[in-house]
Image: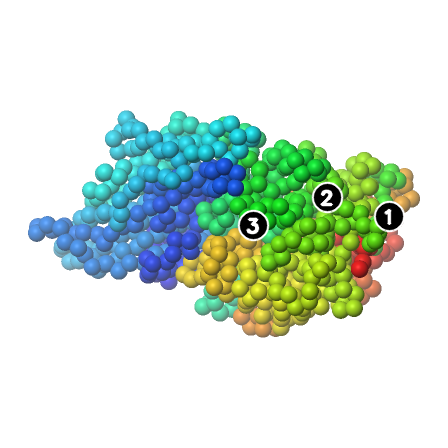
Amino acid sequence: MNYPANWKQFDDHLKVLSDDPSSYMCCSSSNEVPLNLMPYLGNGFIGTQPKSPWIFMDGLYNGEATGSHRARIPSPFSWLLRTPLCIDEGGLYECQHSQEFWMHFGMGLFTQRLTSVNNEVSMTTFVSRQRPSLLVRIIEARFFTRDILQPEPLLLQPDLEIQFESPDCVINIVGSVDPKQLLISGQCFTSESHEFQREPSSFYLHTDVVPEELAKGFYLSPTTPRRIFLTTLSRTSMEDATAQYESALSVAQQLPNQLLVEQADSWRRVWEEGCIRLCCSDTSCQLSGIVLAAQYSLLTCLPDPRHTLQPPFPTQPACSFYGLCPTGLARGAEEDDYMARSRVLGYGIMDASLALDYRYAMLPAAERRAVAENLEGARFPWESAFTGIETTPWQLAADNQIHVNGAVSFAVQQWLSAHAASGLRSEGCTVLPQSNPVTCVEEFTGERAISIEDPETWYNTRGRSLLEHVARFWCSRAVYSLEKMSFELLDVMPPDEYTHCCRNSAYTNAIASISLSAPAKFARLFAAVLPLDYTKWEKMAMQIWMPRDSNDQLMLEHENYVLGTCVKQADTILLTYPLLFDQPEVWKRNMVNYYARVTDTNGPAMTWSIFCICALELKDFDRAVDFFERSLLHVRQPYWSWTETKSGSGAANFLTGVGGFLQSIVNGFAGLRIRLLSHQTVNCGCANSYHMVPALTLCPWIPTQFRSSWHSVRLHSLHFQTRRLTICMDLSRDQWTIELIEGQSVLVGQLMATGTWVFEKRLNIHNDPLQLRFQPICLVACDSIKLPDSALPEYRVCAASLQPRNLSNV
């Protein structure tokens, strides 16, 4: 593949992604790709797209309440290059150049390349990963000498005029000491909430793109073959923007290639921190590139955890990260539900906690809304922006899609289960008997691993409060039915948005039940005292009514659902995954069979990914392949962008669909689950006490149809219980390879025919990678188990995460 010359020096940087650089690059000769299908360029603080007239800044919103949306900052880099003009004795003339556009998903580079027989011009644009406030554009010319002729200089010009105007902000342009630089400040027209925001937010921009000068063009020659343009932004002050600009300029003047080197090094560290790699036997297969591009799209919306977050807006000092997406929804999304799961497991420990910190920062607005609705706890909005008030313009969703509250709690639970080491102190006899069987641990010895304090501290200072607020909300929102002798949730909208209002949505009731049991469950995990409210909520969780059809052995979407009614998207099927809601296998199978038939074929992208995961769990491989292929119909060439619907309508660069697709790889084909198992503690002073054990389970579900084209699936640097593991599924050998690359030892258990996990292997950081034949396996951190003086009796495996099993039936 003849990709841009200035990329070739970095081929060895990204071996963790692929040995073949072409697998994370794509090319187009067309300049007609719609803007909303162009790839992201971003770092979690600022984001844009090639050719976009706008830059977006994390947390910068304009508009009041439901009119709030991401504010548009005018971009100095909205232009492309015209065809270069050559100069000779006769003057200027247009050279014949071919044009290509290249995207490098491994490093976040977009390059316009113009090639002729005499020269090649490349313009590379990127948002710096190393310097969060910086956008860079590097224009380089390579001259090809022919015989004794001296290469001719080139005149380069932009293809459009730059306008520093915005429909969202008052723009103030001031000169600089240097006439080749501009200082621009802007303030949004309107605050989102007069109660929670005292004045509109502002931004500050320093750039060396001066429209009047740029319009004249600039020359590149063999003696001056490069031109670099820089732009920096700040949300606190012009002094900060200028300091960041001058720092980058100093580096670029001393070492012209250094900013590009920084970008390569920063992205290499990001990928080494965690990535999903699909290796295909057929080199022409684009699926491996789609997988990498999907991860890239998520990563561009998140800051680098190794760097200090940018200072918060003066008007919102409690929050430093809101979530940045250059296109798609104008405000927040359901990332707690669909997107966050791939972040929780696939990448660094800090990435997912940033989204949860945002929820914590917005608690005051959520509490105020609950009070206004005569409820308790916190009522989170369907769409959220700067202040945490409701910003969705769709009133029905604002009023009825209360399952978002459960999604917040569920995301907290997933993060804590994956990353927080459990406590080993007994809380006495306040622990309720668990409804799930417990796990068997055999034949291991060793000392307790050193635990990291951050997740437990986060639980004590923020996570516990979030879990409590959500549980208190559900407790006040549920209504007790004497007829059903159960609690109900009335007047709700399920995930199926074709149903605007219903009674007892299966998904809403299930996630409410899980949320109600969460405070007690995680108090046990951290060996904390259980307040009376916790046990009350836990008992209440067991009494949430579920709309089951016992005759057809099917969970109904809601109480009054009529069989045959069309469903917009994945809804009831979400009980199987990601909720892991306990139900017989035949019910799960019936849900896949029935709801696949009635779900809108032009529904949102994540729908078929969820169906794929559920079908794989049931070993219905033919259906799983069909669902997986349906999900790929949402991918658009040439930049592997995702659209909300397969027809291309709705949101583009649809991150919810991206998150669902990645889960079909990790949680579908690799069968990865994070579960809280219960394990009886030893010498704890209570005869009926259970210790919670976070466990990572894997099960290889690979359809025969993919074995000829897929070579391996590699989950690099999974973060689990203060460890990092690399897990490879080798399809050619039907074997797992598990390597511990950071942290204390891990127990590896295999599922016996008796239905018990038996842990006979221990993996240490200095061991060779462990190789096992394809089978279900379970990983447990050694410090999660209190070791007995003698061997423990066998217990049956805990087949699902702990949650109420005996919910009320129809």
User: In what quadrant of the picture does the C terminus appear?
Assistant: bottom right
- The residue carrying mark 2 is 477
Answer yes or no: is residue 390 visible. Answer: yes
Q: Label 2 amino acid?
A: Arg
Query: For the residues carrying marks 3 and 1, which lies nearer the camera in this image?
Result: 1
Q: What is the residue that sits farthest to the left in this orientation? A: 90
Query: Which residue is pictured at 74% across the width and 41% down the height?
Result: 476
Q: Are marks 2 and 3 in contact (CB under 8 Å)?
A: no
Query: For the residues carrying marks 2 and 3, which lies nearer the camera in this image?
Result: 2
Circle 2 SS class: helix
Query: For the residues carrying marks 2 and 1, which lies nearer the camera in this image?
Result: 2
Position of residue 788 in the picture relative to residue 367 (left or right): right
Q: Nearer the viewer, residue 10 or 309?
A: 309
- Nearer the N terminus, badge 2 or badge 1? 1
Q: Are marks 3 and 1 in contact (CB under 8 Å)?
A: no
Rendering quarter of residue 353: top right
- Nearer the N terminus, badge 3 or badge 1? 3
Q: Are marks 2 and 1 in contact (CB under 8 Å)?
A: no
Query: Which residue is pictured at 86% across the width and 48% down the height?
Result: 433
Q: Nearer the viewer, residue 641 or 365?
A: 365
Label 3 to label 1, Cα distance in Å?
38 Å
Label 2 to label 1, Cα distance in Å?
27 Å
Q: Label 3 amino acid?
A: Gly
The label shown at residue 274 is: 3
The label shown at residue 6 is: none
- The residue carrying mark 1 is 433
Residue 83 in the image, given as x and y percentages of width and height: 23, 54
Circle 3 SS class: loop
